[in-house]
Image (cartoon, coloured by chain):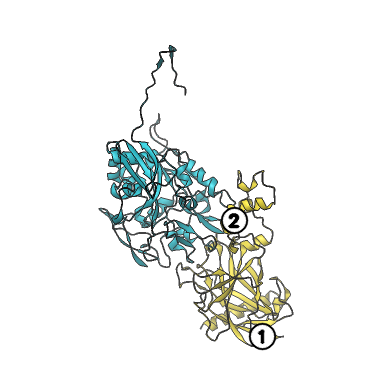
Chain colours: A yellow, B cyan
Amino acid sequence: MKQTVRMVAAFGLTGLLVGAGCRQAPAPVPDVEAGRVASVPSAPTDAAWEQAPEHVAKLIPQDLVEPRLLTPSTAEVRVRALADGKMVAFRLEWNDATKSDLPGPAQMIDACAVQLPKTLEKEPPAPQMGETAKPVEVTYWRADWQATVDGRGDTIRDLYPNAAIDHYPFSAQSLAPGSPEQAEMAKRYAPARALGNLRSGPRQTPVEDLVANGPGTLSSAPSRGSTGKGLYGKTGWSVVIVRAWPPNLADGQRTNVAFAVWQGAQRESGARKMRTGWISLVAKGTK
Amino acid sequence: MARVYNWQLGREMSYWYPESRPQRQFAAVFDTNKCIACQTCTLACKTTWTSGKGQEYMLWNNVESKPYGSYPLAYDVKLLDMLEGQRWSGSKYSGQTIFESAPAGERVLGWRPEEQDYSYPNVGEDDCAGQVDHGALVTIPHMNWFFYLARICNHCTYPACLASCPRGSIYKRQEDGIVLVDQSRCRGYQECVRGCPYKKVYFNPMTGTSEKCIACYPKMEQGIQPQCFVNCIGKIRMAGYLSKPDQARPDNPIDYLVHVKKLALPLFPQFGLEPNVYYIPPVHAPLSFNEQLFGPGAGAAMKMYRTAATDMDLAGLLCLFGSSEMVMSKWRRQGEMVSGLDDKGTELVKVPLREPVHVRPGVDPKLQIIRTNCP
């Protein structure tokens, strides 16, 4: 039944693309197929994506652990994948009527994530954040990090243009602008940054490498060299996440991949998300 | 959910984690009758801890003019509405806590303030609509009384912020019961902001993590009271440690006021968190309002405070408030003198129960001049 629905949706999408005069994309596929290219694209608009088959993944609410997402939001995420032997790039696209990239109290951020098992195993870990002794690797992209990478400044006025600030301790006259002493003073009032919390920015990349051993265990992982780029268009987000190719995954072999999408305007954050179960990720080899 | 005992409710209740009380519990008593809302506590905290980027709107300590003042806006009445009224059977709470009334899929009954709810640090500040020449401009439920409610994090025995965090980034210290957000682990989901009924966790948009009052733990570890306590002009505050009711020690100032005399009461005990900042209720506010804020013990506490001057022990202990910056784990009264002592029994401060009265005549007999009231 699910397959039928997926195929109907996929044919509909293909028809739209053809009708709009686009170059015809490969037919939608039941798995996520990572075809081989010389070098993986880093931009969502790269022409290389046109030759990558699209997998339309239905999203379901995270409703296994509290706090749950009780109201479904994003229906599906359209996924394409390309690999170059070292890296694999995923392009995730989903409809989102509101761009949410300004952090603040009660302001949630648009985001997406790609999850793979840490090791190739016959029995994959639980799809929901892995399980004890069976970790999963997550690469996470956020719209506010993208805005920072794209040039948004690291001041409160970049978030609230009309904010009035009397004084910060690090702006004292005795501290030379840009000096280590000034940076040290700023850290005193930014405890997460002082502790090296990778979540706390300012960021050089819009993605973060993470690892998890079950719900609630998500932690920063040593960088796997992941990168990303997100663009917000008329219908929603188009985001490329590039991460390391799973070790020991040879051409023609399969592993699993899962995706998650958060819509800030729907107040989705953390465990309140739309997600997939495991989907086959197939290494398609040289084209 | 686990079953835990909440002595403020006089019964067991449901909580996300099993009961695990710290070795000792940070606690405080605030005397609302002495607060003048000078906000020195607010500024002492602000300059010490929240002067950084993204902390501009944070008030880990705030003083609000009740009944209307609230920060963030309507933090209290909104949740009271959601709880649909409270029910006490004597000193036992027969209503539902925010843990017991959590909707399906949630860990607690909560809500998340909007950005604009933080735009009014103290709406209705000093508004008193009665006693004007031509009558009041508006008619409102509470016409002509107000009092000041100073608030910090309650370092609850059953914190809703801690229960709400899906990744265990909030912890309660075993050594002193202080509740902290692990800044290296927090990922800014804001579930704690949603869960805390007192709204004492704040999201920092610049670091992307949530931050809260830390009870000045570096000071408490040195036996020194927090910044908002030692800078209090009205000397309304005393910080210390609270025992369980069955282990109360009369020579512990906090135990004496909370457990022995039952003069100091928790704020919104019906929420079910067993908060550890205790308030001496304002004696001039209506009993029904005090009962809503402080529970069924409010009436007896108001009565006791009105006659506190006749109780030498109680009056003596109240004289120790603001008398030393050190944490007074013990106290004793000897005649007209009251002492505060540290853990080892060393005397930290000694104050008279009654200050000597000096009368300065209006006429200076030596200089043959009339004195003015100028200082």
| Amino acid tagged 2 | Met
| Residue A43 image point, x, y percent | 70, 70
Foreground mark, 1 or 2, reads 2
* Vertical comparison of A147 with B266: above or below: below
| Residue B38 image point, x, y percent | 47, 38
Instruction: Work out how far the residue at label 1 is from the one at label 2, CA to CA, in angstroms.
Output: 42 Å
Residue A106 shows in the view: no
Residue located 54% across and 86% down the image: A122
* Left or right: A124 as drawn, with respect to A230: left
Numbered tag placed on residue B337 in the rendering? none
* Vertical comparison of B269 with B347: above or below: below
* Vertical comparison of B359 with B92: above or below: above
Report the number of discs. Answer: 2
Q: Which of the 4 quarters of the picture holds residue A10?
A: bottom right
Report the residue marked by disc 1.
A284
Residue located 65% across and 61% down the image: A147
Report the residue marked by disc 2.
B206
* Left or right: B102 as drawn, with respect to A200: left
